[in-house]
Image: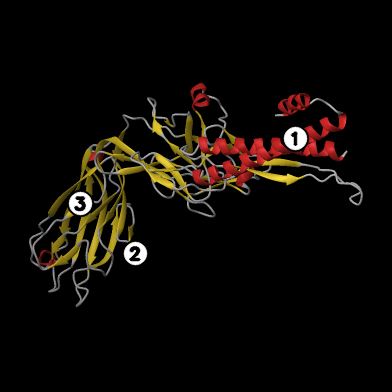
């Protein structure tokens, strides 16, 4: 029993060290593979219970292997803006280009920590191995809707048409005009003052808001009225008046010339005295007009000086073509356009599980959720336990070649030692049964 158990232990040692050699060879082979997570092999002794006072039976060894998915490789800076990597915990969701091409109703989702994504002919952001990046599509205004964080059914393949044109409508405008205070004094000529401010509409065309300021001239008395009527007409609305307001200015010391009150007329939109904004609806879309805050300098004023019309749209541009796409630390994918503006088109969530090492390993450095990994949750990048998404970066392999070569030497020696054990046991059996020596050699060669 003791001799045969020694033979079994030697064979078990060969198998265990063969497994370790397999993991070492795999790690070394993938030393330059982006996103590769190294595999380790652990040995566990096997004990056969018996009467230790009279004899000992060798139980041998068994080995287990597992991939260290929670380890992070160093990040390498690249020239491609859509080379993405996670700086910290978590995974990016991907699907397969074959599933996208077939138009499958339910797309399979796997997880990666890095990927070199490039748009194909259809604008689908994918890797050379066929991983397609998944995310939440943004609304037309660039906002992200409310999506469930416990399901991946709301994720869609990231697709951005390479010839994409985008209108960038104006949504905000500021006025910083001075109205002459002498125009509101008794006996003044009721002269109107006009100014025009261009803006860009919803379709990218240039439109104009025309402002007309009419002073209120008192018929009697000695004091100035300090009151004006402002009417706003819109070229995109066929020149119709879209807002009329009575503006009264403060004439006291210190606050003189600032807005005292703004009263809408003819059912015009309200004026916000806290922000100084009037939210008008133009033929080119909604537009927030900032005319100034009550009691504060800036915006529209009334001083004893000439009329000085200063107004401008604070955003918006003509129709522009897509130049590039890039991602920020929070996982928002921005499309950059030729007129110098950008727009959020997708959000890439970061997937986290309780036990990353419990994920099932798939080809091309991807993983799938299992019962052992625990339930997943979709975080905003950088929130909770997850890391940030970094563009222009690839995660390098976690293989340390020097360490693997050292393990290779020790494993080779252990393997050779187990062969020696088998040879010795074979010689002992040959002696016990008086077998020829060449029979023993045949037996050992077969075991090897």
First in sequence: mark 2 vs mark 3? 2
**Display colour scheme:** secondary structure
In which quadrant will I find the N terminus? top right
Q: Position of residue 34 (x, y in %)?
A: 46, 39
Q: Nearer the viewer, residue 195 or 161?
A: 161
How far apart are labels 1 and 2 at the CA level? Answer: 89 Å
> Tag 1's secondary structure?
helix
Labelled pair 2, 3 in contact (Cβ < 8 Å): no
> Tag 2's secondary structure?
loop
Q: Position of residue 423 (x, y in %)?
A: 74, 34
Taking the view exactly as shown, the residue that stands out farthest to the top is 102
Q: Which mark is residue 312?
A: 3
> Tag 3's secondary structure?
strand
Badge 3: few (under 14), some or many (20 or more) residues near its Cα, within 10 Å? Answer: some
Q: Which mark is residue 422?
A: 1
Q: Nearer the viewer, residue 304 or 225?
A: 304
- Dot in front, 3 or 1: 1
x 54%, y 39%: residue: 27
């Amino acid at each position: 029993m003791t001799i045969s158990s020694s033979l079994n232990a030697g064979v078990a040692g060969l198998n265990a060290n063969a497994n370790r050699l397999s993991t070492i060879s795999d790690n070394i082979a993938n030393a330059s593979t982006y996103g590769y997570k190294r595999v380790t092999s652990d040995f566990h002794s096997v004990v056969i219970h018996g009467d230790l006072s009279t004899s000992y039976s060798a139980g041998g060894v068994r080995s287990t292997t597992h991939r260290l998915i929670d380890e992070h490789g160093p990040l390498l800076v690249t020239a491609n803006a859509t080379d993405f990597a996670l700086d910290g915990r978590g995974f990016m969701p991907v699907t397969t280009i074959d599933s996208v091409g077939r138009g499958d109703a339910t797309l399979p989702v796997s997880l990666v920590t890095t990927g070199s994504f490039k748009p194909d002919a259809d604008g689908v952001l994918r890797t050379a191995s066929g991983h397609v990046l998944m995310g939440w599509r943004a609304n037309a205004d660039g906002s992200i809707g409310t999506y469930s964080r416990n399901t991946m059914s709301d994720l869609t393949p990231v697709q951005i048409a390479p010839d994409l044109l985008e209108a960038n409508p104006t949504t905000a405008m500021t006025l910083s005009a001075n109205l002459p205070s002498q125009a509101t004094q008794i006996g003044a000529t009721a002269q109107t003052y006009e100014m025009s401010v261009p803006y860009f509409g919803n379709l990218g065309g240039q439109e104009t808001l025309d402002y007309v300021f009419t002073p209120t001239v008192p018929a009697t008395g000695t004091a100035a009225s300090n009151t004006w009527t402002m009417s706003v007409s819109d070229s995109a609305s066929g020149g119709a008046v879209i807002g009329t307001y009575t503006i009264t200015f403060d004439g006291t010391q210190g606050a003189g010339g600032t807005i005292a009150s703004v009263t809408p007329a003819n059912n015009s939109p309200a004026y916000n005295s806290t922000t100084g904004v009037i939210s008008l609806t133009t033929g080119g879309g909604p537009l927030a007009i900032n005319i100034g805050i009550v009691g504060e300098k800036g915006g529209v004023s009334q001083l004893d000086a000439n009329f000085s019309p200063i107004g401008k749209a604070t955003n918006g541009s003509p129709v522009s073509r897509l130049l590039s796409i890039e991602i920020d630390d929070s996982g928002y994918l921005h499309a950059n356009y030729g007129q110098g503006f950008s727009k959020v088109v997708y959000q890439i969530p970061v997937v986290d599980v309780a036990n990353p090492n419990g994920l099932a390993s798939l080809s091309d450095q991807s993983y799938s959720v299992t019962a052992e990994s625990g339930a997943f949750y979709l975080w905003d990048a950088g929130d909770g336990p997850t890391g940030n998404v970094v563009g222009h970066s690839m995660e390098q392999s976690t293989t340390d070649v020097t360490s693997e070569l050292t393990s290779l030497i020790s494993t080779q020696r252990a393997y050779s030692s187990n062969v020696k054990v088998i040879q010795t046991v074979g010689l002992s059996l040959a002696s016990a049964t008086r077998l020829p020596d060449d029979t023993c050699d045949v037996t050992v060669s077969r075991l090897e």
